[in-house]
Structure formats: C-alpha cells, structure tokens
Amino acid sequence: MPARKRIGPKSGFHFSEKSDAGIKSSTSGRIGLGAFALAALLTCLVEPAQALYPKKGDSAPHHGVRAARSKTIQGIDVSRWQGEIDWEKVKGAGTRFAFIKATEGGDHLDPNFRRNWAQAKKHGIARGAYHFVWWCRSAREQVRWFKKHIPRDPDALPPVLDVEWQHGSQCTRKISRELALAKIAEMLKGLREHTGKKPIIYTDINFHEDVLEGELNDHPFWLRSTAAPLAKRYQRDRWEFWQFTTTGRVPGITGDVDRNAFFGSEREFDAWRQGRFDIGARKWHGGEPKVAERKPLPTPAGARAPKAAGGTPLRFAPPGRIPPARTAVNRDIDETGSIGGN
C-alpha cells in the first residue's frame, strides 16, 4: 500500500489561442467566453467533488475514479515512505481517517508507526493500523508479531489485513488459493481477538480475482482501483473503502500519498466507529435510523357514502366506460326506481 509511482493520463484541458486580423473583436470575445465556459464545464465533469476537499489534490488525476471524489468522508493511508508527516496540516486539509502501516510479515515494524499513531490521535484523526501479509511466513508467526506491536486502543478503527501478491519483494512466490484463504482466516481471527473489532480486508484487483472472489463477504473490504470504477474491476456487490489514487497530494505530506473514500454517510461512519453499525454485514446493533411507517393511502373523496349512511363503498365506472346519463326516457325502472322515490 505504499505510494507507488504511476504514469497515467492527466485530467485537464488546454486551449490554444490564435489571432486573426480578419476576425472582429466581438467574435473573439464570444469564442473566448465559450471556451472558458466549456473548460469550466469539463473540469466539473472530471473533478466534480474537488470543492469537498479544496486543499487536497492529485499529481496524476484520472477521470475513471471521479465517483470516489464525490464521497463525503475521505482519508489517507501512510507508511515510512511518506517521511515525517505534519499531522496538524493533514487534519487542516479535512482528512477524516488514516490507515497507518504497523507491521509486515513476522519481523518488520514500520519505523514511523508509533509516531504516526500518536500524532494522528493527538490531532483528532480517526486511525487504524494495518498489517502487510507475507506469504512465505506462517500465519502463526505473523499473528504473534502484530499482536506484539499493534495497540489495543479502544478509540482506534478496526485493524486492516493487507493481502496482495508481493511482486518485487523477497517473498514473490504465490501459494494456492486454499492455503491463502486458510492463512487469511487465521490472521483475521488473530486480529479480532487482539483488538476486539472485526478487521478490514485490503486487496487489489489481481489478488481479489485469484483468491477472494466470493469469499469473506461478511468482512469490510477496502479495494484498490486507481483508473476505473470498482464495479468494472471487481466481482463484488459492494465495498466499504476505495483506494482511488496513489498520487494524491495532501498538505503536511511531501510527495505522493494514497487517498481513500468511505462508502457511506456521516451517520454510518460514526456508528461504525462506536460499534453500532457493522459496515461489512451492513447490520445495525442499536440506534439504527428509524424508517417512517407507511400509512395507507387516503380514501379518495367520494369513494364512500357518508358515515351516517353506513360508509358503504360506492362503485365507479372505469374511464371510458361511463354509461349515458339516465333520463325519464331511457332509465330502467327496475334498477333506478322512480324519480319520485329517489
């Protein structure tokens, strides 16, 4: 999950201007205004939610993830690769949560973890720790290691298990799907026993397709997709967190940083933090929003006779089949009675 360099298309528009002595100044003015309006419109379409976080940016924005930018609750994830972080500025930019790398494999502790953990809390940013899995280490070793270093703070977010293939590392071999799922289950159990909270699963497109598709659906999923909507990359009905760029720019952090979005509302985010809402199963444990009881539709005026007359339902002819008005000439005496009697 450390920020990685990525070359991708930039969202932005450049308009060149050419002068022509034969074009009247009024026409040039209209063209200039039209181009300006078009540029503004296209910029809004590409980045519709920049106003939510005006201090944040992206060094290589992609239009495919614009839906993530419209989410109200956004955060970051960090590790040693972000260097020394000014958490006061990070908070001032509107950061709502941070996932902080704690441990890796069975013997590595991120050297910046303890400082980042303390500073995020000091500045009021909800934070959770994550463990990066090594497939060439046993699950038991890794459980022992993260239990030793991940704090059990009651106010912390649930921990994260980061599962992806380790390309370019010392542990590059892939294991079978069955063995990977067994290890994941053992580590999820260890994290939950240690923190008392249901862990989040972070993964990328390749690992999800190879191992996690259709599995562990009761857990919250944090998915990576930096160039397309999640629905186009994953065979999943829903998601809880979306890592939508690795080239984000946030005040207080030098260089690129991963940016993330939460799926839900303020109420759901707060209730999840308090343990009243399971975002993985989408179940409430008290305090759920009240749904207004649906009342029967009001009786149309004239559908019933007055209460004094017994409230007998009246019969109406369907549209287009209204019989002709009855007169003394065409009425049926047996059906309508006499005019005097009525």
Image (cartoon, rainbow, N blue to C red):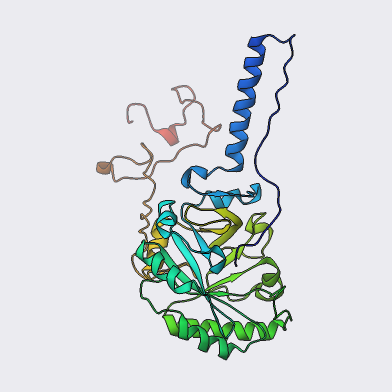
Q: Quadrant of the N terminus?
A: bottom right
Asked if 280 appears above or below 109 in the picture, the reply is above
Instruction: Name the one closer to the observer, 287 or 152.
Output: 152
Instruction: Name the one closer to the observer, 51 or 82.
Output: 82
Extreme residue toward the front, this view: 84
What x and y, as percent, mark residue 84?
Answer: 49, 63
What x and y, as percent, mark residue 64?
Answer: 65, 50
Q: Quadrant of residue 273?
A: bottom left
Q: Is residue 104 visible?
A: yes
What x and y, as percent, mark residue 57?
Answer: 55, 48
Left or right of 112 in this view: 181: right
Instruction: Name the one closer to the observer, 12 or 334.
Output: 12
Extreme residue toward the left, this view: 308
Asked if 132 appears above or below 266 in the picture, the reply is below
Q: Quadrant of the C terminus?
A: top left
- Total numbered labels: 0
Going 51% across and 89% down the picture, which residue do you hit? 144
Q: Quadrant of residue 10?
A: top right
What x and y, as percent, mark residue 147?
Answer: 47, 85
